[in-house]
Image (spheres, rainbow, N blue to C red):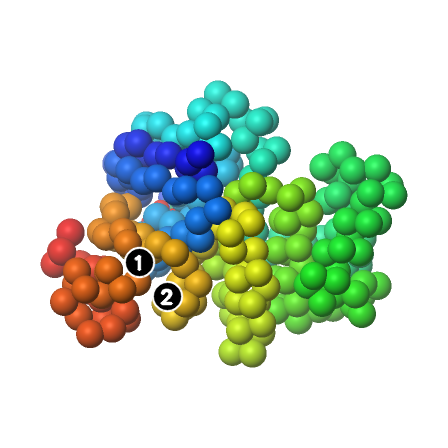
Amino acid sequence: MKAIDIKGLTKTYGQRTVVNQLNLTIEEGEFFALLGSNGAGKTTTIKMLSCLLAPSSGQATILGYDLGQAEEKIKSQINLSPQETAVAPKLSVKENLLLIARLYGYSKKEAEEKAAEMMTTFDLTERQNDRAKALSGGIQRKLSIAMALISQPKILFLDEPTLGLDVRARHELWKTIEALKGKTTLILTTHYLEEAEALADRICIMNKGKIQILGSAQEIIKASGQKNFEEAFLAYTEEGELA
Ligand SMILES: Nc1ncnc2c1ncn2[C@@H]1O[C@H](COP(=O)(O)OP(=O)(O)OP(=O)(O)O)[C@@H](O)[C@H]1O
Ligand SMILES: [Mg+2]
């Protein structure tokens, strides 16, 4: 089944069209990266697909459900790790995880089990009693992703999960994300091109709300006539050139 099927998805603010007639299909289990310069429309797209923002026009089905008609069904099967990390700063690592598990309807016992499982997966067990605000940015990001995974979503949106992380923390998080590959449909946005190149099955480059090109990193390099992915990216995001 298709995880996501988008036809003509558009978002306008006043006179400005920030997501412009997006057509896109993402298969279940695919690792999909959405790239583009600041303001290209990546977060807006992700917000529309995760029911946080109403599209101005166009259609999308998420796991077969129509966006705007089956919001509860969709929301129960997806999750989002937002661009601004969403952890409760005064709660501990474990309390944050328990809170989310209970919100998703797990019993107390199940919530304890889920929290323990996530802390093992994300290497957070030792920090379980530390308040979230006392964690470094990288570990907060890990916690944020662990929280997004607790409901076992079929689709996980990761909006710049490695923003501001040092090289080591970034590489560690890549490993964690890579382990999800194939099990969960992943939609990633990032400004670290090597991240998308290494992890994603397919990459979509957006510019000013429009899709410029879609394919594997190799296909994109080939189509651009450039010698590496970074140069291909620059070519497709250059203003006015290839739009
Ligand atoms: N609530 C809003 N009202 C008006 N314009 C908005 C609103 N939210 C976003 N925009 C505009 O939509 C455009 C796309 O923003 P979006 O956040 O989707 O970009 P992005 O690709 O995620 O960028 P970044 O890489 O910086 O996160 C930007 O020009 C932004 O200013
Ligand atoms: Mg963004």
Q: How far apart are marks 1 and 2 (CA)?
A: 8 Å
Q: Do the residues labelled 1 and 2 touch (CB within 8 Å)?
A: no
Compared across the picture, whether 131 is left or right of 189 comes to right
Question: Regarding mark 2 in the picture, which secondary structure is present there?
Answer: helix
- Residue that extends furthest to the top in the rendered view of this protein: 69
Residue at 32% in and 28% down: 58
What amino acid is labelled 1 in the image? Ser
Q: Where is residue 97 in the image (x, y as percent from the top left)?
A: 75, 51
- Residue that extends furthest to the right in the rendered view of this protein: 109
Image disc number at residue 216: 1
Q: Where is residue 217 in the image (x, y as percent from the top left)?
A: 30, 62
Up-down relation of residue 10 to residue 204 (above or below)? above
Picture quadrant of residue 232: bottom left
Q: Position of residue 147 (x, y in %)?
A: 67, 51
Up-down relation of residue 57 to residue 177 (above or below)? above
Residue at 39% in and 30% down: 60
Compared across the picture, whether 240 is left or right of 180 comes to left
Residue at 39% in and 70% down: 194
- Residue 39 visible here: no
Q: Is mark 1 within 8 Å of ligand 1?
A: no
The one of 93 and 65 positioned closer to us in this rendering: 65
Picture quadrant of residue 235: bottom left
Question: Regarding mark 1 in the picture, which secondary structure is present there?
Answer: loop
Q: Mark 2 = which residue?
A: 197
- The answer to which of marks 1 and 2 sits earlier in the sequence is 2
What amino acid is labelled 2 in the image? Glu
